[in-house]
Image (tube, grey):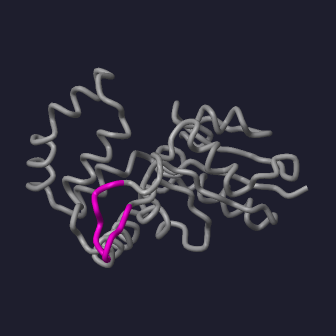
């Protein structure tokens, strides 16, 4: 039977969430602070559960990156991965590499934008939140649903629809991974915490 091993990215393979770190790295401290002060009411409403998380995330992303060329955005993503490898959990990377060596198909399933996840793991399939691009520029909108919660299961099923044909092992660390962990044949919650 085929083996698929699915890893969450933020907090599982990395020691922290990467969205804010990516924005800070891409835009610099002054623009980062100004942007979050501008979006503070939205963030407060999200924390109070008065505004959906995925919509807040898209609006913050749009504020910082709408209109940027895809070429420049991808360059920033590669630079971020090159300069932030220290965020990776060594035991998580080792587990991923061992799964590959054992012949499993490895996939990273993340709510993060796949453009900055992929450069951390070239050659590994990434199922992430995808951005919309028109005429070579970011629209500020997401092309797919935020890959979080049930959407992780939905996206796995899109890629691997015949559930009876594979054994799924999943690694995750947060409430956004609960559905994926429950869907898996074997699950590991917060496995790489020291």
Query: Residue 53's spot in the image, x, y percent?
Result: 36, 35
Query: Residue 123's spot in the image, x, y percent?
Result: 60, 73
Residue lying at the far front of the rendered structure: 135
Provide the major secondary structure of the magenta segment: strand
In which quarter of the view is residue 99 placed?
A: bottom right
Residue 102 in the figure: left or right of residue 126: right
Is residue 133 magenta-colored? yes
Q: Residue at x 47, y 70 (%)?
A: 119
Query: Residue 91's spot in the image, x, y percent?
Result: 60, 52
Between 56 and 133, the residue placed more toward the observer is 133
In which quarter of the view is residue 125 placed?
A: bottom right
Between 190 and 24, the residue placed more toward the observer is 24
Q: Residue at x 8, y 55 (%)?
A: 30
Q: Residue at x 74, y 46 (%)?
A: 169
Query: Residue 76's spot in the image, x, y percent?
Result: 30, 71
Query: On the rendered image, what quadrant is the N terminus found in?
Result: bottom right
Residue lying at the far right of the rendered structure: 1
Is residue 42 magenta-colored? no
Query: On the rendered image, what quadrant is the C terminus found in?
Result: top right
Q: From this view, report whether residue 12 is shown above or below residue 143.
A: above
Magenta stretch?
Answer: 132-141
Residue 146 in the figure: left or right of residue 133: right
Q: Residue at x 18, y 62 (%)?
A: 27
């Amino acid at each position: 039977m085929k083996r698929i091993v699915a890893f969450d990215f933020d907090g599982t393979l990395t020691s922290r969430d990467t969205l804010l770190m990516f924005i800070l790295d891409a835009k610099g401290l002054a623009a980062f602070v100004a942007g979050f002060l501008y979006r503070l009411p939205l963030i407060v409403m999200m924390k109070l559960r008065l505004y959906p998380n995925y919509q807040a995330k898209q609006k913050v992303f749009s504020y910082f990156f709408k209109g940027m060329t895809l070429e420049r955005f991808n360059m920033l993503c590669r630079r971020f991965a090159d300069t932030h490898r220290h965020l990776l959990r060594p035991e998580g990377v080792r587990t991923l590499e061992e799964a590959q060596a054992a012949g499993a198909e490895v996939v990273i399933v993340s709510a993060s934008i796949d453009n900055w996840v992929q450069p951390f793991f070239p050659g590994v399939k990434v199922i992430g939140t995808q951005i919309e691009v028109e005429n070579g520029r970011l629209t500020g909108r997401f092309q797919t649903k935020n890959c979080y919660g049930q959407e992780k299961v939905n996206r796995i099923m899109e890629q691997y629809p015949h559930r009876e044909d594979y054994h799924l092992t999943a690694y995750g660390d947060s409430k956004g991974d609960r559905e994926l962990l429950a869907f898996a044949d074997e699950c590991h919650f917060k496995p790489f915490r020291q």
